[in-house]
Image: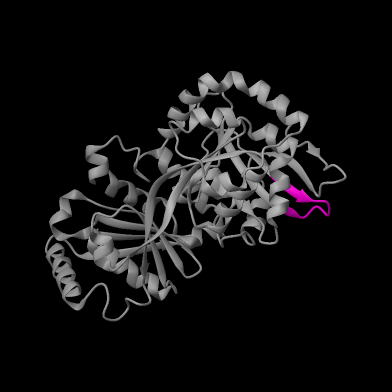
Amino acid sequence: MMQGETIRPAAESCVGIEVRRGFPMLLDRLADRAVGARGFLRAAWYRGDSGPQDGTTIVARRLDDSVIAAIPTVPIGPTLLGARTVPGSYWPFRSILIDSSATQAELTEAFKHPMLRATLTPMWRVGPVYKDDPATVMLKRAAARAGWTVLKRRVGQTFIFDLAANEDGGWPRKSTRRRLAGYERQLGLIGAVSYRHVTGSDWDEAAFAALSAIEANSWVGQTTDGSGAKFLSEEQRERWRRMVCDPHLAKALSATIMFVGEQPAAFSFDLQEGSTQFAIASSYDERFAAGRPGRIVTWRQLQWARERGVTRVDLGAGDSGYKQDMGALPGSEILDLLIVRSRSAAKVLKLKWGEESAIGRDAFLPAADVGHAALLTRIEPWLAAGAVAAAVLALSE
C-alpha cells in the first residue's frame, strides 16, 4: 500500500484506515480530547524524538470521518525485519492517541483492519507506558481481541508526591528547610545564588547552554557516555528545541536553573499537564556537590510549581531513598509492550522480551480468516530473526 492511501471499511465494518507520512497536525487536535488527559502528546512531541527518520502515522476513522485513534511510529531494529515503535520525547509517554469518544469495539476493529496489520506487521513496540493509563488498557485489550499477541516487560514504578497535602507540615519539614537554607547560604559564599525559571516564550539558547553546562559537569557527563543526558550533546538539545517551537509544549515544559555567581549549578526539568507535574530530569554540577544543589533546586522548583497550580508531582521511576523521604508513594507500574502479529513468533520473542499481558491473554481471539492464515505463512521465516530482533529492541533504550 502507498502512504496516504485509504482503504474504506467493508460494509460490515465502521472503521477506515489511512496511513500518513510523518506526524500530521491532526495529532494536536486529537491530543486535546484523548483518553488519559495527555494534552502534550502532540505532533512535535512525537517528532522531537524521531530524528532524521521518516515517521508514519496510522489514523483510524469512522464512516463520518471522525477520528477514533492515531498511531505514530518510526522504524526500530534491523531494517530487514520491518519492526516499528511509537516515539516520544519523554520515555514513559510513548503512547498512541485514542479519542475519548472511541469505544473498545471500534478500536478492536481498527486493529483487525488489513491496512493497519500490513503497516505494523510483523511487530511494533509501545512504551514505556503506565500500566494503569486508560489508553494502555484499551490498547492491550483491542490488539489482543484483534488477534495480535501483546508481550510486556516491567521496567519500573513511578512515585507520586502529593504537593497539596505537603504544603504545610510536610516536605520539606521546617528542620529540612532550615538545613537547605543553610546550604544555600554556604553556596552564597562562593557566589550569589540566583534562579531562573524558564517556560513558554522564555526558552532561548542561554537556557539550553546552561542546562548543557550543568550536565557536562554532572556525574552523567563525567562518568558515562552521555546517552542518558537530556541536553549534553547538540543532538539532545535539538530534540527539545524542536518541541518548544510548539507554543503548547513550550508552556508545558519548564526548567528551574540555579546559578552560583555566573555559573549554572543545578536544574530541574519538568512537564506540567493540568495540576500534575511530571519530573523529567534533574542534575547538578559536581563541583558544588557539598552544598546540596540538587536538593535546593528541587525545593525551589516545588515552591514555583505550587504557584502554577500544581497539586500532584509524578517523580518518575527509580528511588535512591529521597523520593520516599519526601513522602512520595509508589504509583503505577511502567511497562514496555511488544505487539506481535504472529502467535508463533511471539512464543520465541517472549523468551527475551517478557510474558504475555494478562489482559491480552484473556482477550485473545485468534482470527480464523484466510487472509490471516496466509499472513502467518509469510511471517514464519522471520522466526529465526525474532530472537535477534528482540535483543536489539530490549537494548534500544
| Magenta residue check for 65 | yes
Note whether residue 80 is visible.
no
State the residue at coordinates (45%, 67%). 276
Left or right of 173? Residue 210 is right
Left or right of 315? Residue 24 is right
Please provide percent x and percent y for residue 245: 54, 52
| Magenta residue check for 37 | no
In this rendering, the answer to whether 11 lies above or below 321 is above
State the residue at coordinates (69%, 32%). 118
State the residue at coordinates (76%, 33%). 369
In this rendering, the answer to whether 218 lies above or below 174 is above
Please provide percent x and percent y for residue 99: 67, 57
Quarter of the image for the C terminus: give it: top left
In this rendering, the answer to whether 167 lies above or below 230 is below
Please provide percent x and percent y for residue 139: 60, 49
Residue closest to the eye, 124 or 366: 366
Left or right of 134? Residue 278 is left
Residue closest to the eye, 308 or 68: 68
State the residue at coordinates (72%, 24%). 374
Note whether residue 61 is visible.
yes
Quarter of the image for the N terminus: give it: top right
State the extent of the magenta-drawn residues as a range.
59-67
Residue closest to the eye, 172 or 221: 172
